[in-house]
Image (cartoon, helix red, strand yellow):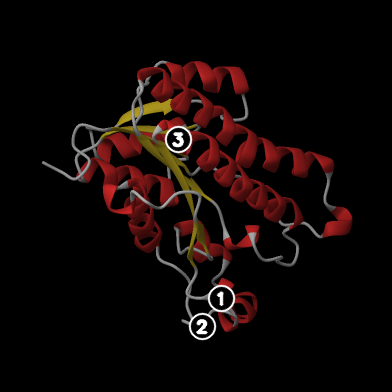
Amino acid sequence: MGKFSGRRALVTGAGSGIGRATALKLAQMGAEVFALSKTAENLESLCAECPNIKTVCVDLSDWTSTREAVQKIVPIHLLVNNAAAAALEPFLTTSPETFDRLMNVNVKAMMNVSQVVAGDLVNREGRGSIVNVSSQAGQRPLLDHTAYSCSKAAVDMMTKMMALELGPKGIRVNAVSPTVVMTAMGRLGWSDPAKAGPMLARIPQGRFAEVDEVVNAIMYLLGDESDMVNGHMLPVDGGFLAV
């Protein structure tokens, strides 16, 4: 029997990267896992890797379709709001389309999914744990990250508001705030020493995070060991935010 045996978990953005690794880890630890992604091919390959995982294919930018899809799978005891969009644009040329897209996916969709999951738990008088995947960019300005940083700062405040209002109802809410993570996309985007060098120079440990290091932090925040941790943004950044 695993640590999360008897609990139902939902991971958004579970087709690849941190979300996929999180879904696989939760399944390994005994949870009944639902993996949500808008990309059917990614969900199919995830099921091929772990047939026990159930899939939900929906575009989180569609408020109504997302709400209906999540309502079909409740109750959910463990929620990982991982799905996110990213874009790099200088402040002066950040477009309203980019800003709206990142806020819709990174913040509004998180609120949508969480409202359904938490609302159902409250109605059942059940306990739960929610982890939002934020970023160091939510607490420290990074060049050309205006829309992304604003969305992640909103995630941090959403986490605090959820913790404040849901904590008395038996639902804890925390966030992880990673530095650059070495997913397949991260390795491609940060393989150039000229780009990576300045960022690495600001990280006391001198390296970027591996996917498992973020997943391990998520598991801690979901689990009973962190039962008195609520409304916290846990950096997984090698000390970037500390200096």
Disc 2 crowd rating (10 Å Cα; few below 14, some 14-19, many 20+) is some
**SS of the residue under disc 2:** loop
Q: Nearer the viewer, mark 2 or mark 1?
A: 1
Residue at (38% x, 45% y) in the render: 20
Q: Nearer the viewer, mark 3 or mark 2?
A: 3
Distance between the alpha carbons at the discs numbered 3 and 1: 31 Å
**SS of the residue under disc 3:** helix
Distance between the alpha carbons at the discs numbered 2 and 1: 9 Å
Query: Which amino acid type is shown beneath numbered disc 2?
Result: Pro
Query: Which amino acid type is shown beneath numbered disc 3?
Result: Pro
Residue 71, percent from left and from top: 44, 17
Q: Which residue is mark 3?
A: 168
Q: Which residue is mark 2?
A: 204
Vertical relation: 89 (above or below) 33: below
Residue 61 lies left or right of residue 162; in this view the side is: right
Quadrant location of residue 141?
bottom right
